[in-house]
Amino acid sequence: MHAVNVAELCFTAPKRMPERFTPESTMAWFHAVDIDVSGICDSDFLQPTAQIRLAEKSLSVGDGMTIALASILNLPVVTTERNFRMVREYATIDLIR
């Protein structure tokens, strides 16, 4: 997972469920489940992020980073976000809902 997406989740989980999550507890969960966090932020990463974002304007920059990282690592994106279907030429998109 890209570091930007981890930061987004550390913000979003406490915002949506403050009784259950804090930024610290969310980060602790990442450490407990041993999710690899990538800090890639070079031109080979940023250019495809921008291309993906231009291809589907409903995606956020963080969404573009998710798809670009999956493409670079040759891994699928597992998501509930239906608009990710529009950029399947960049990475394998597995919709779970």
Image (tube, rainbow, N blue to C red):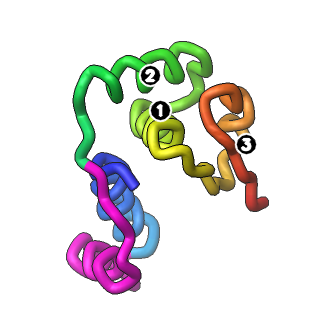
Q: Is residue 30 above or below residue 56?
A: below
Is label 3 in a helix, a strand or a loop? helix
Q: Earlier in the sequence, mark 2 or mark 3?
A: 2
Quadrant in the rendering for residue 24: bottom left
Q: Is residue 34 magenta?
A: yes
Which quadrant would the C terminus be assigned to in this image? bottom right
Q: Position of residue 73 (x, y in %)?
A: 46, 45
Residue segment shown in magenta: 18-38
- Locate residue 13 relative to residue 81 in the image: left or right: left
Is label 1 in a helix, a strand or a loop? helix
- Locate residue 76 relative to residue 4 in the image: left or right: right
Residue 14 versus residue 43: which sits nearer the camera? 43
User: Which residue matches tag 3?
Assistant: 82
- Locate residue 47 relative to residue 51 in the image: left or right: left
Q: Is residue 58 above or below residue 26?
A: above
Is label 2 in a helix, a strand or a loop? helix
Q: Position of residue 29 (x, y in %)?
A: 35, 81
Tag 2: amino acid: Pro
Please say if the residues under marks 2 and 3 sit with CB atoms less than 8 Å apart: no
Q: Earlier in the sequence, mark 1 or mark 3?
A: 1
Quadrant in the rendering for residue 23: bottom left
Q: Give the farthest residue toward the right.
A: 97
Q: Position of residue 8 (x, y in %)?
A: 35, 52
Q: Residue visible at 30% across and 47% down?
A: 4
Q: Which mark is residue 48?
A: 2
